[in-house]
Image: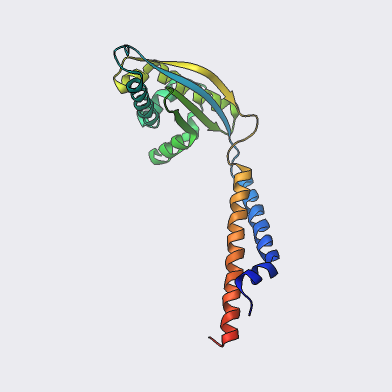
């Protein structure tokens, strides 16, 4: 009677084939989707009049401000300000449907906070690297000029890393898509062998 481990050893080629097929499908899927470049910059949040506050409390306060601003960036009012900031932005890419526009904006802009430092990392994605740069710079401009209004604090937001575009498309990630496809293929191959092993046991014991 063949055990599952024996079945796996005997039919490893099936699992490997499924993994390769999955990787190829992942590659095809990534090539079908539009390739997007990224442009990234960093901002530093500098609160004023914190001399009376201990350093730990000050850092916690900066983190809260950064978290709030990262949420503000995704709002429609902020979106409108960014669109009005530069005539070089291709507004048509977001369409006119409000739901699709919001989804597109949230997919286009990414904000991350480096906790305990006051640093915010902004990234914009677009099929054209120059357009990604324009978008991320416009977001930064609005934050530096009006960010303090959203958090009600006396602070300054400074640009510490200028925009840097990726040399090659970063979305979709071809290696990640291929790895996901290979993993899914391996899992399906394993399930096939497992089902084959179970069916074999039923036949051996006369179970129907």
Describe residue 205's horizontal placement relative to residue 141 as left or right: right
Across and down, in percent, residue 138 comes to 47, 21
Outermost residue toward the bottom?
A: 206
Give the residue drawn at x 58%, y 23%.
164
Across and down, in percent, residue 131 comes to 55, 27
Give the residue drawn at x 60%, y 53%.
181
Depth check: give the residue in front, 41 or 136: 41
Q: Which quadrant is the N terminus positioned in?
A: bottom right
Give the residue drawn at x 53%, y 19%.
161
Across and down, in percent, residue 56 comes to 35, 22
Asked whether residue 92 appears in the rendered view, the answer is yes
Describe residue 155's horizontal placement relative to residue 161 as left or right: left
Across and down, in percent, residue 15 comes to 65, 63
157, above or below 130, in the image: above
Depth check: give the residue in front, 108 or 94: 108
Describe residue 84's horizontal placement relative to residue 12 as left or right: left
Depth check: give the residue in front, 124 or 151: 151
């Amino acid at each position: 009677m063949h055990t599952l481990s024996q079945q796996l050893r005997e039919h490893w080629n099936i699992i490997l084939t499924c993994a390769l097929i999955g990787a190829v499908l992942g590659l095809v899927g990534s090539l079908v989707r539009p390739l997007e470049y990224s442009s990234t910059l960093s901002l530093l949040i500098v609160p004023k009049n914190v001399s009376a506050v201990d350093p730990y409390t000050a850092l916690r306060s900066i983190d809260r401000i950064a978290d709030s601003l990262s949420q503000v960036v995704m709002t429609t009012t902020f979106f409108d300000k960014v669109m009005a900031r530069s005539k070089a932005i291709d507004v048509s890419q977001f369409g006119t449907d409000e739901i699709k526009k919001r989804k597109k904006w949230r997919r286009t802009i990414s904000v991350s906070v480096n906790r305990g430092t006051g640093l915010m990392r902004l990234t914009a994605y677009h099929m054209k690297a120059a357009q990604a740069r324009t978008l991320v710079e416009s977001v930064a401009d609005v934050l530096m000029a009006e960010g303090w209004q959203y958090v009600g604090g006396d602070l300054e937001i400074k640009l510490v890393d200028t925009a840097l575009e990726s040399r090659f498309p970063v979305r979709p990630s071809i290696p990640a898509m291929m790895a996901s496809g290979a993993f899914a293929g391996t899992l399906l191959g394993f399930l096939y062998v497992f089902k084959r092993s179970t069916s074999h046991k039923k036949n051996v014991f006369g179970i129907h």
